[in-house]
Image (cartoon, helix red, strand yellow):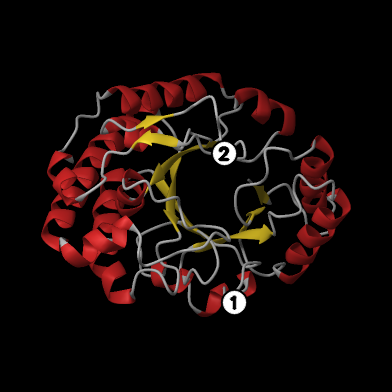
Amino acid sequence: MLKFQEQYDWDYLKAQNRATYYEEVWGGEFQYEDYEGGVVAPITKAPITCAEDLEKIVEMPASAWPLAEQVEACRLLVDGVKDGTPIFNGVFCPAAIFQKMCAVFSIGRYRTATRSDLMVTLIKEHPVEVHRALKNITRTMASYAQELVKTGIYGIFYAATGLSRTGYLTKEEWEEFVKPYDLELIQAMKPLKIMVHDCGILCNPEWFADYPIDILHWPESATGNPSLDSAPNWIGKITPMGGCDERPFGQGQAEKIRRLTRATINKMKDIPFVLAPDCSISVNTSDAELRAFIQAAHESPDFDGKTFVL
């Protein structure tokens, strides 16, 4: 991460944690030598496979191995970054962690979602036990967050994933099983700056407009989502983030990336925002594509050195 930061001089450094560390806290095991598409290691032992496993999801200390390891990684980043560049550490929301513990692949981006998966089934059939597990996950992550605060990082990249997607959880389910635990954990993360990432198609970023957060990131390029320049109509004091479809990255399309980025900057010239790809970019992204993205911002006639490029 430090080499990546030094090479491209991003305005913020977002730590790219391995996505498996949450399940590992509760005994999840993975085939690390066989990453699916180079992104996520296949799970070989899920913490939750049936309703009886819910009682095993107890509150864990921040000193648990995977959490302590991530805290130490943040300390190393803070010590190693140059010029005091702000650092965001990635943290999934409690319901997304629960989903991952059920071995349900995150429904973000353009992946399919089904209401017949284990998470939704448990919510419908064992709500009391699910709430207990979510409370223990939230308390665990709150303790972890307090340790992150001590490292001196600037903020949290809070992955809400695609739980707010139309057609997955109902709005009532989301308000009961997602939002209360989000608000509790976000409160525990203060005074860190909070950047929420809402992921995928039909993701309803408006649902987060009353969250006590600083930045809201959603993919305007994905089907059914509001445009970035609509934010002043509904986002309040939260700063919008996004601006470039992530799908061209890794496809040898540097010029397209430049055009997409310039188009966003032009339409957002009077609206403060954080420039970033709409979601995670491909591991095959080239140096030329990254530099096209950066240069598109710096070529703007309105650029004054204060444009944020994540």
Residue found at x 53% / y 80%:
233
Mark 1 or 2: in front is 2
What is the three-letter code of the residue carrying label 2? Glu
Q: Identify the element where label 1 is drawn.
A: helix
Q: Which quarter of the rendering shows the N terminus?
A: top right
Question: Is 217 left or right of 243, judged from the image as shown?
Answer: left
Q: Which residue is mark 2?
A: 36
Q: In the displayed structure, would residue 258 be above or below residue 123? A: above
Foreground: 295 or 44? 44
What is the three-letter code of the residue carrying label 1? Ser
Q: Identify the element where label 2 is drawn.
A: loop
Q: In the displayed structure, would residue 280 be above or below residue 300? A: above
Cα separation, mark 1 vs mark 2, equals 36 Å
Q: Residues within 10 Å of mark 1 (few under 14, many from 20)?
A: few
Foreground: 2 or 301? 2
Residue 230 is marked as: 1
Q: Residues within 10 Å of mark 2 (few under 14, many from 20)?
A: few
Q: Position of residue 267 (x, y in %)?
A: 74, 71
Tally of numbered discs: 2
Q: Position of residue 307 (x, y in %)?
A: 68, 51
Question: Is 80 left or right of 259, judged from the image as shown?
Answer: left
On the image, which quarter does residue 206 sit in?
Answer: bottom left
Residue found at x 74% / y 48%:
249
On the image, which quarter does residue 47 sit in?
Answer: top left
Foreground: 8 or 21? 21
Q: In the displayed structure, would residue 20 be above or below residue 245? A: above
Q: Position of residue 52 (x, y in %)?
A: 14, 47
Q: Is residue 180 visible?
A: no
Q: Position of residue 130 (x, y in %)?
A: 18, 55
Sequence-wise, the earlier of marks 1 and 2 is 2
Q: Is residue 173 visible?
A: yes
Q: Which quarter of the rendering shows the C terminus?
A: top right
